[in-house]
Each structure stands twice: as C-alpha cells, then as structure tokens.
Amino acid sequence: MNPAIEERIATNIYFDRTFGCEAAKILPGEYYFTGKEMLIVTVLGSCVAACIRDRVSGVGGMNHFMLPDSGNDVDSPLSASMRYGAYAMEVLINQLLKAGARRENLEAKVFGGGNVLRGFTTINVGERNAQFVLDYLRAENVRVMAEDLNDIHPRKVYFFPRTGKVLVKKLKQLNNYTLVKREQDYASRLKSTPVGGEIDLF
C-alpha cells in the first residue's frame, strides 16, 4: 500500500477539558483505537467514520476515510476505490482484534458522507462513502447500532469507546474553510496515488 494513502494511527493526543479525559483527534486517512477511558474525535464532511467497539471489553476505535474518485469505475465492486475502502475498514478491525476485541462482539456506529465537497463530477462522493461503509459492515456481520449519514452539513463526532456513547454536532454555520480544504487535499492525494498492496478480506 502506498504510504500516501495508507491508514495512519492518529498522533494528535490531548487532554479534553470539556469532557475531562484524554482524547485523540483523527484527520482524514487516520484511525485510533484504545481500551482506555478516553475520547476519539473527528470532523467529517464528505468523509465517513466508523466507530467500532467490542461491546463486552470496551476496546474500540474510529477511522476516517474517503473512497478515491474512481471515474468510470464506480459501479465495479472490485474498483480501486472499493479496495481502498475495504483496506481502511480492515486496518481498524484488525487492530481491534489484536487489542483483544472479539469479532462476535463487534458493533458499529457510522457517521459522515455529507454533500459538502463541490466539483466531484461522477456521483456524490459523500453518498458513495456512506453506502460503502454500510455495505461493508453488513457483509462482515458487524451490527450497525446507529448512523448519521448524508445530509449537507459537516459534523463533529465524539466517540467514547469504553461505553459506546457517541455525540454528534452538526456544523451548520461552518465558516471555517479548513475542513473543506483538508478533504479536497485528501481527495487529490487519493486520486493521484494508485492503490496497491494485497488486501486480505476476512
């Protein structure tokens, strides 16, 4: 897998004064997992995040990804973009299993896929991301406990893996250009980077 699109573990760890706990902030192309009492937070536009946890042990994590624009290949189930999406999901699930989670105990909550990026000419990238994450989890028999997908607004997601609690804040007055710029840069990086590497579907 080319490092330009490889999922990376988030390194932005800080103390969140609002919730009084350690927190990890994840950006596009990152993920984080933990068994500790902490918070994982991200801001989503067209990207999606899957919050996955073991409901018994409390080990859980979140990813943040976007399917690359694959041009005419969008309907192919084996397209490069689908391979990347599967890889992004697989990285998180494999890390959770290594950390002690059990596959039969996994549950998910999924967010994002907003129509906030202009200039994607094939199909709304947010809708593709949202549909992909639901299809993937269904195929892997991971129960989706909650979802907040599509819409036109970015959203900030706070995930507490130990309890499974998620707080979602719709950013309806987003004057900050940073989110859109970050996702456009991420999308451009994905588009210009061929997807390589073998993926073991399980």
Image (spheres, helix red, strand yellow):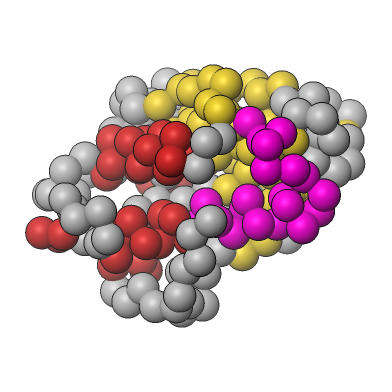
Left of 182 or right of it: where is 145?
right
Horizontal and vertical percent position of residue 189: 37, 68
Whether residue 75 can be seen here: yes
Horizontal and vertical percent position of residue 180: 38, 46
What residue span does the magenta drawing correspond to?
Answer: 88-107
Whether residue 156 can be seen here: no
Answer whether residue 185 is magenta in the image: no
Left of 128 or right of it: where is 108?
right
Query: Which residue is located at x 54 percent, y 20 percent?
Result: 146
- In the rendered image, the vertical position of residue 9 relative to residue 48, given as above or below: below
Quadrant assignment, res 62: top right
- In the rendered image, the vertical position of residue 195 relative to residue 125, given as above or below: below
Answer whether residue 96 is magenta in the image: yes
Query: Which residue is located at x 48 percent, y 38 percent?
Result: 137
Identify which residue, 119 or 98, lies in the foreground. Answer: 98
- In the rendered image, the vertical position of residue 64 relative to residue 72, given as above or below: above
Query: Which residue is located at x 28 percent, y 35 percent?
Result: 127
Quadrant assignment, res 172: top left
Q: Main secondary structure of the magenta part?
A: helix
Horizontal and vertical percent position of residue 138: 44, 35
